[in-house]
Amino acid sequence: MQEARRKLQGLEDDYPAASWLPVICQNPALEPLTWLQLGGGAPCPYRSLEAFREEDAAFFHGRESVTERLAAAVKKRPLVSIIGTSGSGKSSVVFAGLIPRLRTSMAVQIAAFRPGQNPNLILQDYPPTLLLAMTREELEQAIIQPAAEMNVRLEEGLTNRLIDEVKDQPGRLPLLEFTLTQLWSNRKDGWLSHQVYEKIGGVEEALANHAEGEYAQLGETDRKRAERVFMQLVSPGEGTEDTRRLATREEVKEENWNLVTHLASCRLVVTNRNASTGIEMVELVHEALIKSWGRLEQWMRAGGEFRRWQEQLRAAMRQWESNGGNSDGTRFKLIPNRWESNSKERLARLLDAAEHLTGAPELVVEVLSPGEQNIQRDRQLKLKLYSQQGVQEYWIVDKDLRQVQVYRRDNAVLTLALTLQETDAPTSPLLPAFSHPLTRIFGQNRSP
């Protein structure tokens, strides 16, 4: 202390009152406090439910050997594909592992895009690289090293506790990252603790607890809106697991977009804009939400059959639209049958070899065939036939008049209930959550 004071006094000529400056002493027997321990902020090195990006490469650990194998394969083969279960870290390996590795050894151009419906048709001639579950040692690096980069440590035993929750289950990596992000947000004095881990519910329940907590804060009206929004973001599986899907702002409805924005701020959904069409889109933050959040699972169990029919109708409408309206008079036949699981089998029984109806569906959508004789058949003969056979609704799509006539059963007879113009969106009691603006159909087929 005295030596420090003498040195400050020697600076008085150039710096008046230098000797008055405080002298800070450090005890060499104690470990100095870090910036974090002093209360300084630091970016989270974990990625929650999002994939690691190229700019996150410094925090991406545990996949070094896989990265090296992929880099070697890219230099030898014209195309390298990676397959693995959802949540196994495929995107992270590519963006935070492979791409930075390639940039250090060769000149590369990177283009990222979402593949179409059948990418396997392109990849079938190239054997894929299977992304295996991380070993215990790799998981340890993925957990410890990002925190170590920020001078943060995990309490003794916490790393093993985390690993035991996800080992041999590659699809649970997003849940691990989400849990680590929650631990980071609640760190204290540079430590990730067992106490916080137990408070958030561990790997098994952390995401579900987060989703349920955000849902619980919504009012009753917004809870009902949230149910409708979330169900539109899930594609029901056909004998397979449900998966997340991209939905347009139009599909979740304009009046719900403010709720979508709120859910995005809660990190439950992700919004973006299609670069080619400019259409705003939304999707679940990760498929792990479908598997871990019990409430969403219950919604899909109750409404899954309806969602299957909704997607089938949308696919049929898109096909009709892309084919210029199908001037051959294509019919879309739906048999909701109260959304029973055997509805597909029932449809098969009701169609003969020529695809003529032999029984009564609940709803028929008919595109008028060209020609006066065909128009009379669709408007009169089929209307009478569907009335007799018990059809509940009959929609007649007239692409020339650019309108849809909706007939509904009234006292055992189908009668005209309303006529929809191209600016309208058809709805039906048989399809309680369905709405498909007619401009999507008629807009591309306007007569000159």
Image (cartoon, rainbow, N blue to C red):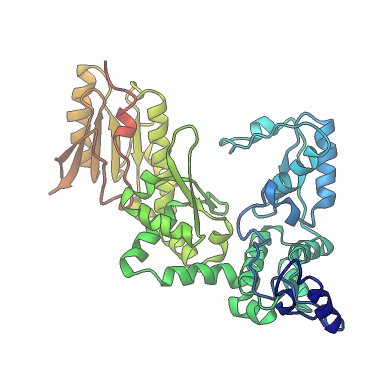
Q: Is residue 64 left or right of residue 329?
A: right
In the rendered image, the vertical position of residue 182 relative to residue 392, given as above or below:
below
In the rendered image, the vertical position of residue 330 relative to residue 44, given as above or below:
above
Quick check: can you spot residue 218? yes
**Occupied quadrant, residue 304:** bottom left
Residue 229 placement (x, y as % from top left): 40, 55
Frontmost residue, 308 versus 411:
308
Q: Quadrant of the N terminus?
A: bottom right
Q: Is residue 369 left or right of residue 109?
A: left
Frontmost residue, 410 versus 55:
55
How many numbered callouts? Answer: 0
Quick check: can you spot residue 235? no
Frontmost residue, 18 versus 72:
18
Residue name at image x 52 percent, y 60 percent: 267
Residue 234 placement (x, y as % from top left): 48, 52
Q: Is residue 118 left or right of residue 143?
A: left
Residue name at image x 78 percent, y 73 percent: 160
Residue 321 placement (x, y as % from top left): 38, 29
Residue 422 placement (x, y as % from top left): 24, 33
In the rendered image, the vertical position of residue 402 relative to residue 29, given as above or below:
above
Q: Which residue appears farthest toward the front when viewing the image? A: 13
Q: Quadrant of the C terminus?
A: top left
In the rendered image, the vertical position of residue 319 relative to residue 47, given as above or below:
above
Frontmost residue, 436 versus 329:
436
